[in-house]
Image (tube, grey):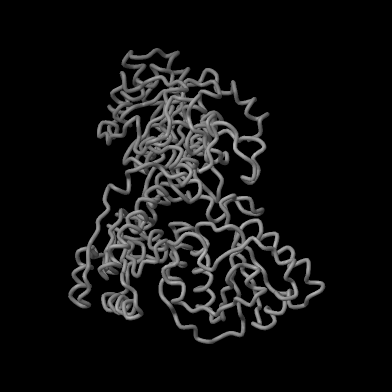
Amino acid sequence: MATVDLEKLRTSGAGKAIGVLTSGGDAQGMNAAVRAVTRMGIYVGAKVFLICEGYEGLVEGGENIKPANWLSVSNIIQLGGTVIGSARCKAFTTREGRLAAAYNLVQRGITNLCVIGGDGSLTGANIFRSEWGSLLAELVSEGRISESTAQTYSHLSIAGLVGSIDNDFCGTDMTIGTDSALHRIMEVIDAITTTAQSHQRTFVLEVMGRHCGYLALVSALASGADWLFIPEAPPEDGWENFMCERLGETRSRGSRLNIIIIAEGAIDRHGKPITSRYVKDLVVQRLGFDTRVTVLGHVQRGGTPSAFDRVLSSKMGMEAVMALLEATPDTPACVVSLSGNQSVRLPLMECVQMTKEVQKAMDEKRFDEAIQLRGRSFENNWNIYKLLAHQKISKEKTNFSLAILNVGAPAAGMNAAVRSAVRSGISQGHTVYVVHDGFEGLAKGQVQEVGWHDVAGWLGRGGSMLGTKRTLPKAYLEKIVENIRTYNIHALLVIGGFEAYEGVLQLVEARGRYEELCIVMCVIPATISNNVPGTDFSLGSDTAVNAAMEVGMGPAAPRGLPSRGVRLWGPPRLAVCVGRGQELAAHQGFEDGREECGPGVTRV
């Protein structure tokens, strides 16, 4: 939002009051959302009230509804859970409870409510809004408020933010808390991988997801799990034989571990639950593998929110305030969602109804439709997992060959991208080469044909397994062209930072001189700097922000010592994540880390 727009907003909320509450199960990032709603509300001139203990606090009133100021939400962005509390409230499901809630809001002049919670909490908010007029009329008839007061506060506006680690709400690509929960799962997988390899064990990992398999699906995709169970896609009959055959094949190729990920709501084609204990016993009985079960439970809700969740919650909280300010009596209750990388407003009840349709499709065993209803992101993840998890012999070999190389500084995710590209190419019958040491390696002929299993275990590894250099191709054009001709390369996939982008441009510009360069070329941005044009995010930038954030908000991070505190020199996104704009303000004159940092600035 432009500066001029922000200036116009400064008084747009004058005379209005906003209440914010968290309800249902807690999710990492809720505090960041509370902070964003509070500070954006104060910025536009509105009064902001923190409603403690969710709907229970709304019904009971009193000290549970507190006026907030700027400092009320200081130093909470890095905290998990919700500092204003959350509780499941039976009273709010009754009209008497909602009548008490309406009275408590009117007493404080609150006619704008931001609800952070799951679909049940948001549905309750919409019911509250639809009954608002009749509730005020009842309060007038009981003599608890005057007719003029009822007219002054005749309309209640609702904006919802979805806080759920399951990512089970339709209409949004990601819900608050999901990314952090995935961080917890991946931390556990990384931890058990070492012990599993040491003892040649099989681990059955059970994750949350009673009705939605998103956490299980994405963690399986990110870890390269050998088998996956999710409620949206039950395995075909006879899956026990197929699974054991796959696990046996993996061990026969020299793998020292197997990972099976199962959502807690996993079922078979007939609706019968598939439990982690059953899967473990099956592997032990049929294969004799040393097998362990790990049930994560509420560990997934714990810990600090990830950088993504902090930024997502901050953006959504700001958008929720804007939605409340712009609402009219005819505006339906909205939910702030994520589409692509943009915050959008969608009709609340349409999204709730779509979410219910998913469960209905699963109950009626329309599983393919259930996956489609989950949304494009879920369906794409499912298709990618099926493609990359197990080798499928291509029916015919093509004459097409692809070369993959890394260019620029190493970035987290490079190896995962190489693995995905290699296996995707092989599955389509293409010949796939990998090039070591970037464009320089291509010039020197460091080209190697690669197979499906050559990239096994690359997903979780940092850096670049292929080796990478910043060297641009301009100085080696003739040798690069010669090797492209020698290996009959029809396409180049370059994974790297701005050097990769610039290098491919140089190759394109040289097409007029070298016919061999008239081939398909593609760049996958991979740099912690996130400075490649054409994309919102580069591979590695999210990991880098999380690493810097851990330093900035760790146990040893200074508190209340602005004159002596350590300053981290980093991008504005990091300042948003840790909520310390002053400490993390950009320092002019330090470009690309080549100049010395100023006083109080620590390069980590």
Q: Residue furthest bottom?
A: 396
Where does the image place residue 232, in percent across and percent down from the top left? 36, 62
- Count the marks: how many? 0
In the rendered image, the quadrant that contains the N terminus is top right
Q: Quadrant of residue 99?
A: top left
Query: In the image, is 603 to the left or to the right of 292?
Result: right
Where does the image place residue 275, in percent across and percent down from the top left? 22, 63
Residue located 40% across and 27% down the image? 132
Q: Quadrant of residue 342?
A: top right
Query: In the image, is 386 to the left or to the right of 583?
Result: left
Q: Residue furthest right?
A: 512
Where does the image place residue 11, in percent across and percent down from the top left? 59, 20
Please name whichever residue, 73 or 120, is drawn nearer the observer in this view of the structure.
Answer: 73
Q: Is residue 181 visible?
A: yes
Q: In this picture, is 171 found above or below 266?
A: above
Residue located 32% across and 45% down the image? 301
Residue located 54% across and 31% down the image? 600
Q: In this picture, is 282 found above or below 64?
A: below
Q: In this picture, is 47 found above or below 457?
A: above
Q: Is residue 237 visible?
A: no
Q: Quadrant of residue 68?
A: top left
